[in-house]
Image: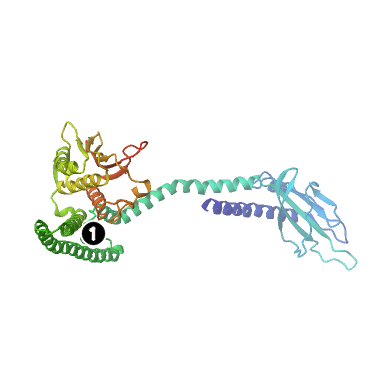
Amino acid sequence: MSVVITYVVAQDIANTAYDRNLSKALTILSHQIAWPSAGATPSLRIDEPAQIALRTQESEGIFWKAQLTNGAVINGDQALPTPMMPPDLRLNQAYFKDETIGGYEVRLAYMWLRNPEPMSRGDLEQRVLLVAAESRDSRLALANSIIKGVIIPQFLVLPIAVLLIWFGLSRGVAPINKLQKRLRGRKPDDLSAIEDQSTPSEIAPLVDAMNDLLSRLSHSVQAQRRFVADAAHQLKTPLAGLRSQAELALKSAPNDEVSDNLKKIVAGTARATRLINQLLLMASAEHPETVAREVFDLNQLSRELTEQWVPQALDAGIDLGFEGTEQSVWISGHPLLLSEAMNNLIDNALRYAPKGSQVTVLVRRSETTIDLIVQDNGPGISIRDRERIFDRFYRVLGTQVHGSGLGLAIVKEIAQRHHASVTVTATRPNQQPPGTRFTIRFMSKP
């Protein structure tokens, strides 16, 4: 925009200056006309001072001609064009026009004059057309000089202006950037109020509104946590009593039918107790600040947990194994939560894998990652179900295994709390049955 405006202004300045010179040239020519009386033909004789004035204008020189009303040229260059008389002609007034002569662009200035002496009634009015022309090269050169004189300093000033604007904006938004970093650096479970001591007054209302939202959200989360914990604890006691009474009654069951019913009660209370424990663990996984974080050997923890599941694996007719690393694999985390995550994965594998299957717990370490893997050679999980099995209370259709649908959701929550990822793939993608492999991947510090 600046270049366009400068170009237009420069063209106007150059045209005004050179048009003024052409107008002066017409004035000089008008003073050189001799007006005879009694209807004689006017003449134009350029004296030496006038010739010098015309040739030394601020251009390459001015060309002219003087022409009568009948078209006769009384002096000057006959090659110059003859402009048409405007309908609203005003004598002794200069008009301007751009023309092209022999491939060159020129600027014309023309004027109509009449004999200033009063004429007799028998004489026709005598008029003379004066034409002055010059090349447009000079005015274009002047316009370019003006453009260069204005634009070049702008190109030097613009970077400085950009730097000043950048510096000003950086200083202006620095408090906002600090606030953004503080918010991004917060833990997901940190719902404390934002300090507004260094907050700019322009965004102070926004910070106040965010603090109000955080306060209400904190109260809501606390109420939810208290409800889950209280409900779980209140349900565990009567369920434990019901299970104990059912087990006692089972020892003295009078017949097989009563015994089967009591066994179903015991199994149902066991599933309900496990669901309650999973709800409590889900609450702990969502708010792990209540659990101590420590450095432990993942290899040793995985081996110990695998050994604890061996009796259940033998009862189910499944070969349960462990493959660890030769050296210790130290990570920082919550052993209790990771133990529950591994228990859920092993329990799922033992539940869904058919009799005679193999379930293996593996610990692998590379330069950048640590992998905890639980895999089996069972029927596997379809690709469509893999996208939803980590949702709460979602269960794969077509299975006869009892469950709450919380186990894998707990595994995912625990993995996220340890800044790890959990994925599910096929153990043997190109074979049948494909099997299932769950991988919890931790980032390994060098």
Q: Position of residue 350 (x, y in %)?
A: 23, 44
What residue sits right under mark 1 in the picture? 198
**Position of 205 relative to 409 (above/below):** below
Question: Is 211 in front, or is 412?
Answer: 412
Q: Is residue 183 above or below residue 211?
A: above
For the residue pair 410 and 262, the one nearer the viewer reads as 262
Neighbour class for label 1 at 10 Å: few (<14), some, many (≥20)? few
How is colour applied across the structure in the image?
Answer: rainbow
For the C terminus, give its image quadrant. top left
* Residue that extends furthest to the front in the rendered view of this protein: 255
Residue that sits furthest to the top in the current view: 326
Image position of 221 (left or right of 45):
left
| Residue at left offset 51%, top offset 49% | 150
Q: Position of residue 356 (x, y in %)?
A: 25, 39
How far from the left and from the top, in percent, is residue 11? 60, 52
Return the residue nearer the eye: 116 or 110.
Answer: 110
Q: Is residue 108 left or right of residue 166?
A: right
Give the amino acid at mark 1: Ser
Q: Identify which residue is drawn at 79% across, 63% down.
A: 116
Residue 302 position, x and y percent, is: 17, 40
